[in-house]
Image (cartoon, rainbow, N blue to C red):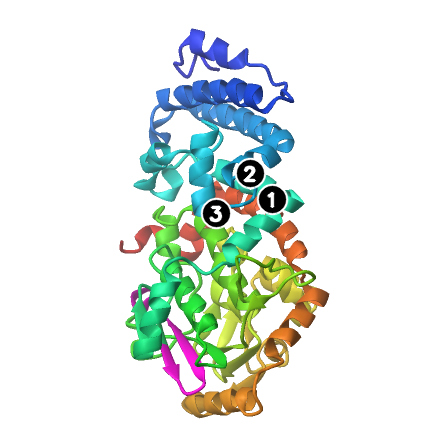
Amino acid sequence: MFERAGLPRETVTAWLGCDDAIASDYRQAVETFSRRWRIGAELLASLAAKPARSDAQVAVAAAILDRDRAARADFLSVHVGTLYSRLTDDFTKFKRVENLVHDAAAAVLGLVPDNEQLASENHLQQKDKDGLEIDQGIFLSHVLKDAACGMHLCHAMLLPRPEAAEFGRRFGEAGKIELAGATLERRGKGAHVIMRNPRFLNAEDETTIDGLEIAIDVATLDPSTDIAILRGDVVEHTKYRGRRLFSAGINLTHLYQGKIGFVWYIKRDMGLVNKLFRGVARRDASPDELVGATIEKPWVGVVEGFAIGGGCQILLALDYVLAASDAYMTLPARKEGIIPGAANLRLWRFTGDRIARQAILYGRRLDCDTPEGRLICDEIAAPSEIDGALERVVDGFTSSGVVSAAGNRRAFRVAEEPLDMFRRYMAVYAREQASCHFSPALIANLERNWNAHKRAV
């Protein structure tokens, strides 16, 4: 097979002859497996670009990737604790996932793709990528599977982003800030975060994630407000022009075009979504509800039009949902071919197991103003009366003060979803979502269900 693919016999023999045994000594294991992964990468790079490969080259590429990924999993099963300790200076430094995978590429050559390897695929459409980022999923899954490493990483992702301090200062002075993907404005006792991606129906993508997370940090930490509100902005799309929409979920056009990296999913669910659910962590205190505390305030979501995919996932992390009577929610994971964030962990607590499975596995739509929709939505108002209803909700939450809000949120979480449960879920999610993100089924689903190949860039 390797000969038919046109690969040099000497290099193939060297790669096939690499020892699969994992040395107990960390340095020795790194040296042995980095050499093995370097040879595998050379063989893969010797093949034609993915769209131009022969049948033999397609088979060989799969064999190389599968064999070396199995070795990565075996290596991490033994040495993930040592590696993570080295990357974080014995757990004294907090590193976000995007920085952790970058540093891991330098610490253990070949374990995860480096910047050069990522750049070679970044310009390609999703279907034309070899999926080198799957190795990031394997790495992060093992980090999260380890209790000590995983809880430390969860803590890192709940810390306010470095940019939040400066934006918080500006917000304190002006009462309003604008970021890529979000606007934050103080209105009375509420900090209003407005999600913005008007061309794409307020969908989430690489252009929105950082700004939205910073806005959530600043809103949560703002001492002048007692409550935070999450809402979608007015959009530009011809069909909905002039209307507010909550969110269309992940930007499927960008996903199909290869513009969303795998780490985006982990940043989103361990960062901004988990901050909505748990608050913002302190560096000197664990965010685990049993031993520490986070800085938090109640979050209210306002659903207008629809909350699709990621939009619906966000609602499951909020304390109160106000919805327009004509709005609806969907989790079209089946039609997309990916895992809907932490919805598998959280949706069933709202709707029960059967409706949750119908929504995730079979695409069931939940209209907000129905008995099933009201399991997620706390209050329904006519579209023309949403603003007035929101004022009443904010007043209802804040008229007697919110001194007990953080404590009650923690008390709910420790019974429903303690941080360690979330860690374990994310260990599975990181592994499975990486495979889904590069699955041929994803491309087929996007072309069949969303006409993604006909969308404009």
The numbered mark, 3 or 2, whose residue comes first in the sequence reads 2
Picture layout, residue 236 above or below residue 434: below
Residue 336 position, x and y percent, is 48, 54
Residue 414 sits inside the magenta stretch: no
Q: Nearer the viewer, residue 193 or 42?
A: 193
Q: Is residue 456 left or right of residue 229?
A: left
Magenta-colored span: 185-200
Q: CA distance from mark 3 to mark 2?
A: 10 Å
Tell me which corner region of the image, top left, top right, bottom left or bottom right, holds residue 334: bottom right
Whether residue 72 is visible here, answered yes or no, is: yes
Cα distance between the residues tagged 1 and 2: 7 Å
Amino acid type at circle 3 is Lys
Which residue is depicted at the point 52% across and 39% down?
89
Q: Quadrant of residue 422?
A: bottom right
- Circles 3 and 1, Cβ within 8 Å, touching? The answer is no
Q: Are marks 1 and 2 in contact (CB under 8 Å)?
A: yes
**Which residue type does callout 2 highlight?**
Tyr
> Pointer 3: what residue?
95
Do tag 3 and tag 2 residues touch (Cβ < 8 Å)? no
Labels 3 and 1: the sequence-earlier one: 3
Lower sequence index among marks 1 and 2 = 2
Classify 10 Å Cα crowding around label 2: few (below 14), some (14-19), many (20 and above): many
Q: Nearer the viewer, residue 200 or 42?
A: 42
Residue at coordinates 44% horizontally, 92% vertically from top-left? 388
Tag 2's secondary structure? helix
Which label sits on residue 84? 2
Query: In the figure, 211 relative to 436: above or below?
Result: below
* Residue with the mark numbered 1: 149
Q: Where does the image place residue 78, in percent across and percent down from the top left? A: 64, 30
Where is residue 446? Give x, y as percent.
43, 52
